[in-house]
Structures are given as C-alpha cells and as structure tokens.
Amino acid sequence: MSSSHARPGPRSIELFERAQRTIPGGVNSPARAFNGVGGGAPAFIDRAKGAYIIDVDGNEYVDYVGSYGPMILGHADPQVIEAIQKQAAKGLSFGAPTGLEVELAELICDMVGSIESVRMVNSGTEAAMTALRLARGYTGRKKVIKFAGNYHGHVDALLVNAGSGPLTLGIPGSPGIPEAVVADTLVATYNDLDSVAEAFAAHGDDIACVMVEPVAGNMNCIPPVEGFLEGLRSLCDAHGTLLVFDEVMTGFRVHPGCAQALFGVTPDVTALGKIVGGGMPVGAVGASRQVMETLAPTGPVYQAGTLSGHPLGMAAGIATLSQLADGSVHRAIAPKLATLRKGLAEHATRHGVPFLTQAAGAMFGMFFTDQPRVERFDDVAACDIDGFSRFFHGMLDNGVYLAPAAFEAAFISRAHDDEAIERTLAAADKAFAAVAQA
Ligand SMILES: *Cc1c(COP(=O)(O)O)cnc(C)c1O
C-alpha cells in the first residue's frame, strides 16, 4: 500500500530494512510503526525545528505528533536547548540531589493546584506505576478502577484491554501478564458514571483508587462529558478511595494548571510525563504532602530510580514549564487551533467526507464519522478507520505528519504559525479528496 505513496523516501525505506534486523519491528515504541495505516516504512527523522520535522530524505513535514505531546513550545526551542547544553557541560548525572530538582518541584507545586510534593521518575509509565502503588500503599486496599481505552503506560496491572461495555473483571491485555496481576483491576466505561457506580457497588471499600485520563487522549481525543469528573470525585469521596488523574498527556497541555484546573476537579494523586520533561525522559507523581510521604524514605512504600531527577531532564523541564506558567502560550495557541479545526471541517464538507474534530487546550482529535460527538470507546471504534488511513497518507504525501493511527490524539504547538496552518489546510484539501475518491 505504501509503495503507491511518494513518502517516506528511499533513505527511510533503507533504514527501516536495516532497523528490522536489530530492533523488533524496526521501532523502539510500537506507536511509531505504520502497521495501523497499511504498513510500510515509517519516516525516519533527521531533525526538527519549530512546527516542522525533516526526515532523512530531506522531506519537511508540519508536525502534529510533537513527540506524542512534549513539544508544546515547538521543536528545538532555543531556551530549552540552551538550558540542556549548559547543564551537559557541568556533567550528566551524579546520583545525588541537585538544585534543579528543587526548582522543578517548586514550579510543579506552584502550577498544579493539588500537588504539594512531587517525586520525579523517568517516564509516564513509571509515573502511573508509582501512582498505583502509592494509592494501594496509602489506603491499604488492592483494587483499582480504570477505563477501557484509557492508557497508563505499559504497567502490568493497568494494561487491561477489556473493551467497552459494562464493568468486567480485567483480563490480561498482553501475553506475559499473568491473570493474577490484573485480578484487582476493574474496567469501567469512560464518560459513563453508572459503570463506575456499579464497580463501587460490587467492590465497595476494597477500591484503592480510580485512575483516569481526565481528557482521554489514547483513544483519539475525548473530553469528559459534563459531570463525569465531578461524579468520580464524589464516588471516591464517598468510599475513601483516591482519585488519580493520569495527566501524563493532559498535564500542562490543556491548561498551565493541567486538566484539573481546566475542569475544576481536584484529584488526590497526579501522574505527569511528556511536557514535564520538555522532550527529555521525565515523569513525576504528585499529591498532598501527607500522601506523598507514604513513599520511601519518609514512608514504607518503596520507589527509586538511579537516573531519577536527571539534571538534563530537570533543566529541560524548568525551561519548558517556566515559559508555560503565565498562560500566554496556551492563549496564543487557542485561536490557531480554532482556525485549523474550522478549515479542516470546511474542506471535509466540500469533499463530502463525514468528519468531526474535538479538542481540549492544545490537543485535538480527528474523527471520520457522521456522529455529532464522540464520547465513548464504542463511538471511536465505530469511526471509519480506512478513511483515516487514506487521509493519513494524503497528508504525509503533502507534507503533514500525523500520528500513524486513528486512535491517537494530535498536538499543536506555539510554533504552528499561520504559514504552517495554511500548509496543513492545503494538504488537507488534497487528502480529503483522496478519502472521497475511495
Ligand atoms: C504517554 C502516556 C503514558 C505513558 O508515558 P510513557 O512516557 O510513554 O511511558 C501514560 N499515561 C498517559 C495518559 C499517556 O498519554
């Protein structure tokens, strides 16, 4: 299928052939493979600047992946790059505390209302894993409620793909995860409070935490319906259960104070990743001081990391968050995303392609559907996946890089200027034509 397309070019194809010999599937994270859009070689990237990434064949693309979220300032932001270079010259890692960790912790505590204390880790997966252990250790309970279609990294107990529908006992989402490990994972339906109430009714006071993406960003982009997050808060309060927001994607992207500020619902525990490291591998878990001091060395819940609080990650995180704190970046992005969504809708209509966008802050989703809204996993599953695939290749051929899967959110940055958006819409005109032709 990909051979009929102009891109990726010969150098990417050659690298992909080599990569498959020494790297499983040729990629270091399955999200980067093109399996979801007909297969073939992904573009191998050489460099990036602002709103653009450039592949090894010299093709330039307007980028809406943004490294799956971190790049809200645009690629190679001068302040971030300078902070990393300065820090690298002082040595890479010490296995002892630095002032940078204190500075980033203070920034996070200032910006995120529910966080008084924060522990740095090395990825979003680690942040979610630590949040779960912390909630279990703090409450002395075992069970966790998660939502079908929500992703919390590749943590064993949370990698449960039980599908939508009524609450079911989790089944392992991957070979290699013993059933015993997910026996205490309950799966509810996102944006369906009744499914959560049912889980509480059945398992009452045995539930340590409800873990939720406050805007679902791993089944395209689905904001919470009115009352959903508030309802989770009330159910958790009524049962002495901790509410965990996995804000690895939404954190600092939908609002400088994260989704909890945008929607005015305060979680007990927050998992962070992506933007918090400004493009370096950083995650974080934050909560009240009382909850956080359950962690070692103040408390009994063990958690550790040789490279945690890594100086380069801290430097990049500080340089990124300090530019987001006053809200000016989010205010600048909002009208650009509005223009983009309006333009996409107009082109789709003109070509007669059923199409919908949804957004929260600086993340958005594109759905090939005639549904007026997409609120639940089943709605996403009902969208036209082939239509997306044709759109994806049409965009790629015309210089726009989208995530190669219909279930990923898209990310816009401060660097997406008028020209980048015009280029995107010109490409979309052609890509929608290709969708309509099929
Ligand atoms: C990306 C993501 C993770 C996993 O983070 P990694 O850094 O890839 O381990 C966890 N939760 C959510 C909501 C995410 O979007």
Image (cartoon, rainbow, N blue to C red):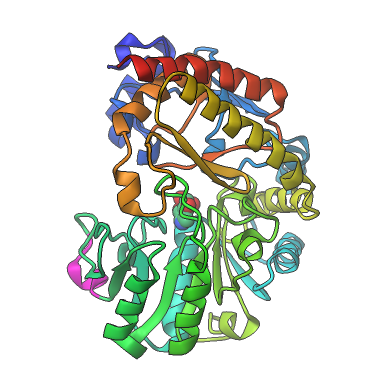
Q: Which residues are magenta?
A: 177-183
Task: Indicate left or right for 194 with 358 as reference.
Answer: left
Q: Residue 297 sits in which quadrant?
A: bottom right
Q: Note whether 90 is above or below 297 in the view shown.
A: above
Q: Position of residue 151 (x, y in %)?
A: 39, 56
Q: Position of residue 366 (x, y in %)?
A: 46, 36
Task: Indicate left or right for 431 with 306 as reference.
Answer: left
Task: Indicate left or right for 205 with 430 as reference.
Answer: left
Q: Note whether 102 is above or below 277 in the view shown.
A: below
Check the picture and name the quadrant holding the C terminus.
top left
Q: Residue drawn 52% across and 29% down?
A: 345
Q: Residue drawn 36% across and 82% down?
A: 207
Q: Note whether 133 is above or below 2 in the view shown.
A: below
Q: Residue drawn 58% across and 79% down?
A: 292
Check the picture and name the quadrant holding the N terminus.
top left
Q: Residue 388 sits in which quadrant?
A: top left
Depth check, front residue: 54 or 362: 362
Q: Position of residue 189 (x, y in %)?
A: 34, 63
Task: Indicate left or right for 341 with 139 as reference.
Answer: right
Depth check, front residue: 138 or 86: 138
Q: Position of residue 267 (x, y in %)?
A: 56, 73
Can residue 87 be seen at all in this image of the molecule? no
**Residue 318 forms part of the magenta stretch:** no
Can residue 49 be seen at all in this image of the molecule? yes
